[in-house]
Amino acid sequence: MDLLGAIKISSSGLSAHRTKMNVVAENIANNETTRTADGGPYQRKTLVFEAKGSEGFGSLLATEMERGDGVEVTEIVSSPDDYRLEYNPEHPDADPLTGYVKMPNVDLLSEVADMMVARRSYDANATAVENSKNMIMKALEIGR
């Protein structure tokens, strides 16, 4: 693999983790949203990462390792977890019989942890790009 390929792979990681941070920020922002355009509470969103151009992990592992296309976000999906029930009979979206409100299935602690992981991964990819750039510059200096 050449150094430009390494930069390409790291830049795909930068893009994927930027998307991850945006989705986590959306989840945090909608932590208390009980009514969406679909009519129900907000549903937590998660991402699906895949190797670029892959058709399956087992069958294409060797090819992908050689080709090194990077990673991409293939899908943003809603979490299937149940909503939280919160007792608040005064809330406009409360069930008139029980007084419980369906709250989004967003756990702030998990979202903050996901944001930290995504940020560290983003930083690692940025460092890899910088290091690859420095190696290219050193190689050009040797060639002089």
Image: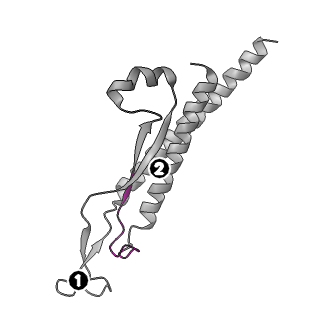
**Disc 1 + disc 2, Cβ < 8 Å:** no
- Mark 1 is on which residue type? Asp
Q: Residues within 10 Å of mark 2 (few under 14, many from 20)?
A: many
Which one is nearer the viewer's eye here, 101 or 11? 11
Residue at which label 1 appears = 95
Q: Which mark is residue 20?
A: 2
Q: Residue furthest right?
A: 144
Above or below 91: residue 70: above
Based on the picture, tell me whether residue 101 belongs to the magenta stretch.
Answer: no
Which of the 4 quarters of the picture holds residue 35? bottom left
- Mark 2 is on which residue type? Lys
Q: Which mark is residue 110?
A: none
Above or below 97: residue 105: above
Tag 2 or tag 1, which sits nearer the N-term?
A: 2
Q: Residues within 10 Å of mark 1 (few under 14, many from 20)?
A: some
The secondary element bearing badge 2 is classed as helix
Above or below 81: residue 129: above
The secondary element bearing badge 1 is classed as loop
The percent position of residue 28, horizontal first and vertical second, equals 43, 62
Based on the picture, tell me whether residue 42 belongs to the magenta stretch.
Answer: yes
Which one is nearer the viewer's eye here, 108 or 67? 67
Cα distance in 3D space between marks 1 and 2? 34 Å
The percent position of residue 96, horizontal first and vertical second, equals 21, 87
Residue at 46% over, 61% down: 26
Question: For the image shown, how many numbered marks are present on the structure?
Answer: 2
Q: State which region is magenta.
A: 34-46
